[in-house]
Image (cartoon, rainbow, N blue to C red):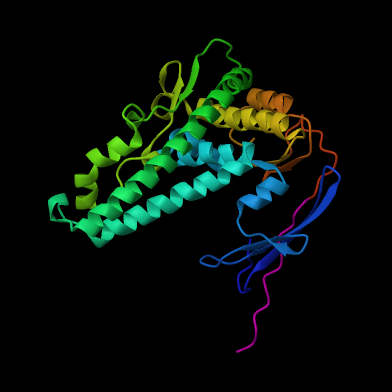
C-alpha cells in the first residue's frame, strides 16, 4: 500500500449509506506506524466506528486460514463477525481485552511465584481481576455462542450449494470446557499454572471453534477445495445476516477468491453472490460469468523518485 521511499499513503472514498454521504480518509503508515482514519473530517476514536458507519465485508485468500489455520484465526473470524452484526458489542470485546491485559500484567509482576507466597495485596488484586475477567469472558462467550447459532444454518446451506454436495453434514460449534463450571472457577483452578507461566492460560482468548465436515474435523480431514468452500460459506452467511440486521447489504470486496476454485465452483459462487455493490479484485482474467458493470485495469506504477544525496 505504501510506495517504497515515501512516508505513507492516503486512501479516500465517498460512500452513500442510506440518505447520508460519507467521506472516509485513511492514512496508511509503513510497517510499525499507526494508521489513522477520519470520516467527514472527524477522526475516529476506535476502528470499530468505521464498521458501524460503513458496513463492509471482505472475502480474501487468507480466509482459508479460518478453517485450516490456528485457533486464533477462528477466534478472530467469529469475533469480527460478532462486531459486524452487532457493533455495540465492540465495547464488550474491548473490555475483555483490557481485563486480560491487566491480569497478565499482574501475573508478570509476580511471575514464577507460588500462590502461598503471595502477599495479601497481590492476592486481593488477583481475585479482583479474576472476577472482572470472568464476567467479561462469560459475556463474550455468550456472544460467540449466539453468533454460531445464528450463522451455522446459513453456512451449512451455502456450503452445500457452493460445493455442489447436498448431503454432506456441516458443523460449527463453540463449547469450551470451562463453560461447564464457569470461568471464575476455571481461573481459580488454573491459578497455580498461571502464576508459574506468568500468563492467563484459560478463557476466551485460548478457545477454539470446532468446524466439522462429514462429522470429521475440517482442519485436518477436509480437502483444500472444501476448506475454501467452508470459509466462503461463512462469509456468505455473514453477508446474509448483516443484510437482514442492517436493512441493506454491506459493500462486498472480493480479493482474488476465484483463483483457487475450479470452474464449476467459480460459477456456483457467482450465482450465490448477493445483491448489492461488489468490488472484485483479481490478478488474472475476470471470471466468465461475472459480467461487471465496469472494469478498471491497474498498470505497474513508476518507481518513486528519491532525493539526490
> Image quarter for residue 285?
top right
Question: Is 202 covered by the magenta stretch?
Answer: no
Q: Residue at x 72, y 35 (%)?
A: 246
Q: Is residue 304 magenta?
A: yes
Q: Residue at x 52, y 44 (%)?
A: 92
Q: Quadrant of the C terminus?
A: bottom right
Is residue 177 visible in this depiction of the protein?
A: yes
Q: Nearer the viewer, residue 303 or 194?
A: 194
x and y percent of residue 13 in the render?
77, 55
Q: Is residue 181 above or below residue 36?
A: above
Q: Quadrant of the N terminus?
A: bottom right
Give the main secondary structure, helix, strand or loop, of the magenta stretch. loop
Left or right: 169, with 285 as reference point: left
Q: Determine if residue 59 is in view.
A: no
| Front residue (pair 81, 233) | 81
x and y, in percent, of residue 25 in the image: 73, 61
As displayed, is residue 176 above or below residue 309? above
**150 horizontally vs 205: left or right:** right
In front of the other: 85 or 129: 129
Question: Whole-percent x and y of residue 136?
Answer: 44, 43
Q: Is residue 278 above or below residue 100?
A: above
The boundaries of the magenta stretch are 297-309
In the image, what residue occupies the spot 33% across and 50% down? Answer: 128
Rendered position, 24 above or below 73: below
Residue 97 coordinates in the image, percent (x, y): 45, 50
Q: Relative to residue 179, is residue 108 drawn left or right?
A: left
Amino acid at each position: 500500500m505504501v510506495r517504497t521511499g515515501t512516508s505513507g499513503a492516503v486512501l479516500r472514498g465517498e460512500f452513500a449509506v442510506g440518505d447520508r454521504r460519507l467521506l472516509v480518509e485513511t492514512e496508511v503508515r509503513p510497517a510499525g506506524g499507526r494508521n489513522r482514519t477520519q470520516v467527514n473530517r472527524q477522526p475516529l476514536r476506535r476502528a470499530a466506528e468505521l464498521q458501524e458507519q460503513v458496513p463492509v465485508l471482505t472475502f480474501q485468500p487468507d480466509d482459508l486460514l479460518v478453517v485450516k489455520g490456528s485457533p486464533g484465526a477462528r477466534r478472530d473470524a467469529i469475533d469480527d463477525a460478532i462486531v459486524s452484526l452487532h457493533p455495540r458489542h465492540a465495547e464488550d470485546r474491548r473490555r475483555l481485552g483490557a481485563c486480560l491485559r491487566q491480569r497478565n500484567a499482574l501475573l508478570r509482576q509476580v511471575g514464577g511465584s507460588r500462590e502461598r507466597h503471595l502477599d495479601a495485596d497481590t492476592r486481593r488484586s488477583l481475585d479482583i481481576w479474576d472476577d472482572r475477567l470472568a464476567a467479561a469472558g462469560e459475556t463474550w462467550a455468550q456472544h460467540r455462542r449466539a453468533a454460531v447459532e445464528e450463522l451455522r444454518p446459513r453456512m451449512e446451506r451455502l456450503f452445500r450449494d457452493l460445493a455442489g454436495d447436498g448431503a454432506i453434514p456441516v458443523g460449527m460449534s463453540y463449547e469450551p470446557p470451562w463453560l461447564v463450571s464457569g470461568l471464575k472457577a476455571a481461573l481459580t483452578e488454573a491459578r497455580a499454572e498461571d502464576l508459574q507461566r506468568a500468563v492467563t492460560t484459560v478463557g476466551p482468548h485460548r478457545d477454539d471453534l470446532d468446524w466439522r465436515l462429514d462429522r470429521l474435523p475440517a482442519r485436518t480431514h477436509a480437502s483444500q477445495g472444501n476448506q475454501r468452500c467452508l470459509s466462503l460459506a461463512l462469509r456468505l452467511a455473514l453477508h446474509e445476516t448483516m443484510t437482514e440486521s442492517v436493512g441493506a447489504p454491506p459493500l462486498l470486496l472480493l480479493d482474488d477468491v476465484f483463483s483457487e476454485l475450479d470452474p464449476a465452483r467459480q460459477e456456483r459462487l457467482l450465482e450465490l453472490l448477493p445483491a448489492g455493490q461488489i468490488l472484485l479484485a483479481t490478478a488474472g482474467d475476470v471470471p466468465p460469468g461475472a459480467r461487471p458493470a465496469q472494469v478498471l485495469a491497474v498498470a505497474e506504477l513508476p518507481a518513486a523518485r528519491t532525493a539526490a544525496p
